[in-house]
Image (tube, rainbow, N blue to C red):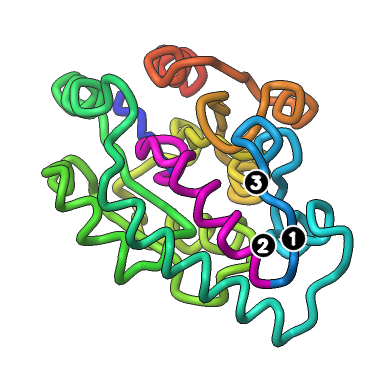
């Protein structure tokens, strides 16, 4: 029987943490915030993003400040992410999963119009049954989008044999809302200590995540 993986993009398939942190620091500077190291970012990161910003800035940004933060982040991330690559072994993992007769899709909170060309740049678009990015505000959570994504896939996937692989606690919470499995990867936005309390398996490589996906969705 086929198993389906719903992949996350930023911090999971895409190895973009350095770009994310640099763009975030540029955004923080617009409201007088101090820069973070990658380690500090990963230790403090959480979703929804406004709560993360409040934690690292020490105050709740106003509506106008939030707009400036978001615009600055998007501007810098767009430029910096042009030079980032996929995480180690991603093309081989995607190809191997498909060769074994399984299916996969991609759901990201990255803006949909920017996600599609980013995926196509790496030539991996044909590996996915469906690619969905964010179409609403940039500060939301993933649960509602996950439900819509799986509903759109319809009978092509079996929820009992579906596994979300992502780097954020929010990925696991979205999977829980949609009634599917999850595996969390430590190579992205969160440190292990902030992933383990969620209560799903936590791994240090995407190869381990795929191996667990084979075991979980039986």
- Front of the two marks 1 and 3: 1
Q: Residues within 10 Å of mark 3 (few under 14, many from 20)?
A: some
How far apart are labels 1 and 2 at the CA level? Answer: 5 Å
Earlier in the chain: of badge 1 and badge 3, it is: 1
The percent position of residue 197, horizontal first and vertical second, equals: 80, 27
Look at 59% across and 43% down and name the residue there. Answer: 171
Which quadrant: the N terminus?
A: top left
Q: Secondary structure at mark 3?
A: helix
The percent position of residue 123, horizontal first and vertical second, equals: 11, 44
Q: Name above or below for residue 56 compared with residue 15.
A: below
In magenta, the rendered stretch is 9-30
Taking the view exactly as shown, the residue that stands out farthest to the right is 59
How far apart are labels 2 and 3 at the CA level? Answer: 22 Å
Q: Name above or below for residue 51 compared with residue 92.
A: below
Front residue (pair 42, 36): 36
- Tell whether label 2 touches label 1 (CB within 8 Å): yes
- Tell whether label 3 touches label 2 (CB within 8 Å): no
In-image side of 93 versus 34 (left or right): left
Earlier in the chain: of badge 2 and badge 3, it is: 2
In-image side of 55 versus 21 (left or right): right
Look at 58% across and 56% down and name the residue there. Answer: 24
- Front of the two marks 2 and 3: 2
How far apart are labels 1 and 3 at the CA level? Answer: 25 Å
Residue 44 falls in image quadrant: top right
Q: Is residue 24 magenta?
A: yes
The percent position of residue 209, horizontal first and vertical second, equals: 46, 19
Q: Identify the residue position indicated by label 2 in the image.
A: 28
Residue 59 falls in image quadrant: bottom right
Q: Identify the residue position indicated by label 3 in the image.
A: 170
Q: Is residue 25 magenta?
A: yes
Residue 39 falls in image quadrant: top right
Q: Identify the residue position indicated by label 1 in the image.
A: 33
């Amino acid at each position: 029987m086929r198993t389906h993986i719903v992949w996350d993009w930023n911090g999971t398939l895409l190895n973009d943490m350095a770009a994310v942190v640099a763009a975030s620091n540029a955004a923080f500077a617009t409201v007088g915030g101090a820069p973070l190291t990658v380690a500090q970012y990963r230790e403090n990161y959480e979703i929804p993003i406004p709560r993360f910003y409040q934690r690292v800035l020490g105050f709740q940004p106003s509506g106008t400040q939030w707009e400036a933060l978001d615009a600055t982040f998007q501007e810098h991330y767009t430029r910096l992410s042009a030079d980032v690559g996929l995480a180690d072994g991603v093309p081989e993992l995607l190809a191997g999963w498909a060769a074994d007769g399984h299916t996969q899709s991609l759901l990201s909170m990255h803006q949909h119009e920017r996600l599609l060309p980013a995926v196509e740049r790496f030539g991996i678009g044909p590996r996915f049954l469906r690619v969905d990015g964010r179409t609403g505000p940039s500060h939301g959570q993933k649960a509602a989008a996950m439900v819509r994504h799986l509903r759109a896939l319809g009978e092509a996937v079996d929820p009992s044999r579906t596994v979300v692989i992502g780097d954020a606690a929010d990925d696991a919470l979205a999977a829980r809302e949609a009634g599917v499995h999850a595996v969390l990867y430590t190579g992205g936005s969160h440190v292990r200590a902030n992933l383990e309390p969620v209560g799903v398996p936590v791994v240090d490589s995407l190869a381990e995540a795929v191996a667990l996906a084979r075991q979980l969705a039986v």
